Image (cartoon, grey):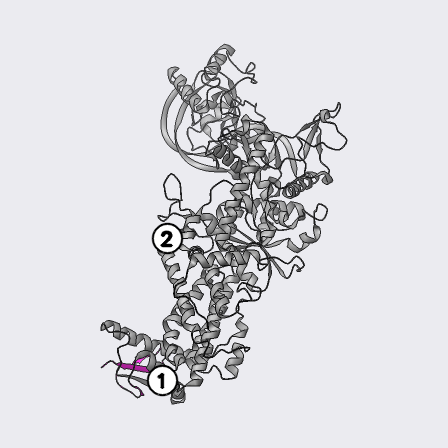
Amino acid sequence: MTNLPNQYDHLTIEKKWQEKWFTSNVYHWNENASREQSYVIDTPPPTVSGLLHMGHIFSYTQADFIARYKRMRGFEVFYPIGFDDNGLPTEKLVEKSRNIRGSQMSREEFIKICEEVVKDAEEEFRKLFKSAALSFDWRQEYQTISPTSRKISQLSFIDLYNKNLVYRSPQPTLWDPSDQTALAQADIVDQELKGYMHHIIFKDENNNDHIIATSRPELLPACGAVLAHPDDARFSHLKGKHLITPLFNIKVPVIFDDKVEMEKGSGLVMCCTFGDITDIQWWRKHNLPLRQVINRYGKLTFEHLDYSNDALDLNITKKFLDELKDLKVKDAKVKVVTLLTENNLLQKSEEVLHVVKCAERSGTPLEILITEQWSVKIIDHKEELLKKSNECTWYPEYMKHRMDNWINGLNWDWCISRQRFFGVPFPAWYSKRKGEEGKIIIADTDQLPVDPFTDLPKGYSRDEVEPDKDVMDTWATSSVTPQLNSLAINKDLAIDYDRHTKLYSADLRPQAHEIIRTWAFYTLVKSHFHENSVPWKNLMISGWCLAADKTKMSKSKGNVVTPVNLIEEKGADVVRYWASNSRLGADIAYSEEVFKIGRKLINKVWNAAKFSSQYFEIFKPNNITLLEAKNNKIIFNIIDLWMLSKLKQTVELATKEFENYEYSFARTAIEDFFWNVFCDNYLEIVKTRAYNQNNDDNEGQKSAISSLYFTLNYILKLFAPFIPHITEELYSAIYNPNNFIHAKNNWPNSEELFIDDNALVIGENFIQILAEVRRIKAENNLSLKTPVKEIIINVKDNNIKENYVKIIKDLQNVTQAEKISFGTIENMIESIDNSISFAVILT
């Protein structure tokens, strides 16, 4: 006999099953499986930045619902986990935790410390993910800085280089003065900041005033031209003329360009190198002089600038430049405004809110500087990338618009080099040999992975080459996560091409919506360039985890919830239940109320299983299927058939929702059946018959117990992807101690179930009568056990009266009715399908 404890102990049971799953092969992908047999998930490698937050549990658990479902559907699920353990986020973690600066120590020493720190940080992730019952195949774990990952990343680079899709050149670059590195367009955020719009007086060659409004007066020394719209009649007299920059007295040409907004400011705008992206376009289009006055540290410098050909008075120019030299941008801005005011060259200043491009990581306002960088050519491939996006199926569908909008809005090629330390190095050197100075030398593929600081290209000595000092943007490695798993870039550049054919392209990419423009886009780029393919068939997009007040969790706000403590306190199944409440693409708020509902569900599943399983020693339909039990009349009672028909509908609906990756809708359908059909109604209806105290209905008892036996089994399997610990515990104790509930082919098959249309109609009418009895008792403040004098049923078609005769005993038991009769009285309640009407007489 199954003896379940009265209370469910989540601490003990969850740890027990986590250990058993981990030491078993239940989540292992079979490498001998064919591509058709496998379901491949391109799992997000979490960034090793030292912070375990609720977002990790939220998004990774949602992906786990799908992994468990697909495994139970019979697939060999390839479900890896990796760690994105290099790049700027990891460096900042190391610098903060060890109180060091990478720029103030040897590269080798800093990298060694980084490797030590990431080991500890990754172990914290492992503990968290195991405690949340994420069903990864831990044998497939990878790190983006490992030798294998470095080799795949460098193979990717070499493939792009050989195809002339990557280049290195001096170019305008988004530069973070705080972290001292170039950034890609996807690494920036637009922040609305307070500032001032300064209306500055330029002079023309006849000493007439012209007003130009700017929020960056410190860039006046970088001004190379003033522009107006060709249709703006106000400035037609300035064609072929020059204006004089205030303070610095530099002659700059007036140029007419249709990108100028006539309605903005005075209609005149200065082009500085560089204030924004439009300045870059004008600089290139009109071949303007390069006057880069801001250095990599965010300070003004004029060392390499020559104003001698354009300055009206070079001494005056130098005088004002000297006053700004070495000032930080913020201080220089104040200084220039002061100088303009003192020299009567400022008309007015007005406070404004303006959008400033800032580094996503450091929050520092960016500068656009000319630096030498590696870039991937994407601007010329927008249309191709849009077509590739269309080849993927997006869940939810509207998230595809984010990708398309991002592609359409691209202004820069993808800058993939970073001036940092702990990352994947470029497999490149620069020749110092006479006659080929500066020639780029790329490593042979059989040398990979290489570190150009310690390794050498074939045929060259140490003094003949200069190593490439940059490392790859972390997204340049994360963008090949499908290939990090498949171990190949393409057929020509592979570690294991046979494995690649089994794992590429992946079936699913689960990820959050905020990294569509980075991870999803860059992965799409690499897949298109490497094999003219898409990296995955489907994308499942999750939202964010918010604080209880629906704002972003933040340490400064004090609203951060630690997932480790939360799982310990409430149990992993309860936390997983919370995560299942968010629809695809939608954010979810931390909610104590939802946790309470989850706890209530866990307790109810336990109690329902405990209640139902007490009867299984009386009768157990062993070695027989549900359909056989029905066909052999073991299950025959109309209410049993009604409940089992509702079960089939639930299995079909849950399966359909899971196939559309709508795990939340699937869980809602399952939970609705469990609470409203099985617990609140069926268990109450059937318990007297299952108990059969007077031994007067043995066949009815068998029908009830058999229905309970099959249905509880299906309920546990339906809930298994969401609340794996309790379902595993109950399945093992009641049904099969030798097989995991999450094993392959354990998802309920609707073909093994049935729908009895007649039972559905009668059952729904039965439930309506029961609901009316409960309503009357509640309105009269009576216990549900209070007897009912009589229930009168009017069967409008006498041909179906026999069916209602069959349910009299169950109806009488559950309603405590003294008598159920067939007849007619006035004002009867019409049933749902109008096939009967009924009346309830309380006293």
Residue that appears at 56% across and 37% down: 116
Taking the magenta stretch, the answer to whether it contains residue 842 is yes
- Mark 1 neighbour class, 10 Å CA radius: few under 14, some 14 to 19, many 20 or more: some
Expressed as whole percent of the image width and height from the top left, the position of residue 249 reads 48, 15
Q: Which residues are magenta?
A: 817-843
**Residue with the most extreme right position:** 459
Front in this rendered view, residue 405 or 98: 98
Is 22 or 73 nearer to us in this picture?
22
Kindly identify which numbered label has been placed on residue 808. Answer: 1
**Mark 2: which secondary structure?**
loop
Tell me if residue 545 can be seen.
yes
Q: Decide: is 811 above or below 734.
A: below
User: Residue 436: horizontal and vertical position, in percent?
Assistant: 74, 26
> With 535 as the anchor, is 707 left or right in this view?
left
Q: Residues within 10 Å of mark 2 (few under 14, many from 20)?
A: some
Residue 781 counted in the magenta span: no
558 lies left or right of 635: left
Three-letter code for the amino acid on which mark 2 is drawn: Ser
* Residue 837 on image: x %, y %: 32, 82
Q: Which label belongs to residue 591? A: 2
Looking at the picture, which amino acid does disc 1 mark? Answer: Ile
Indicate which disc, 1 or 2, sits on the residue closer to the N terminus. 2
For the C terminus, the quadrant is bottom left
Residue at 71% in and 29% down: 439
Quadrant for residue 551, please give it: top left
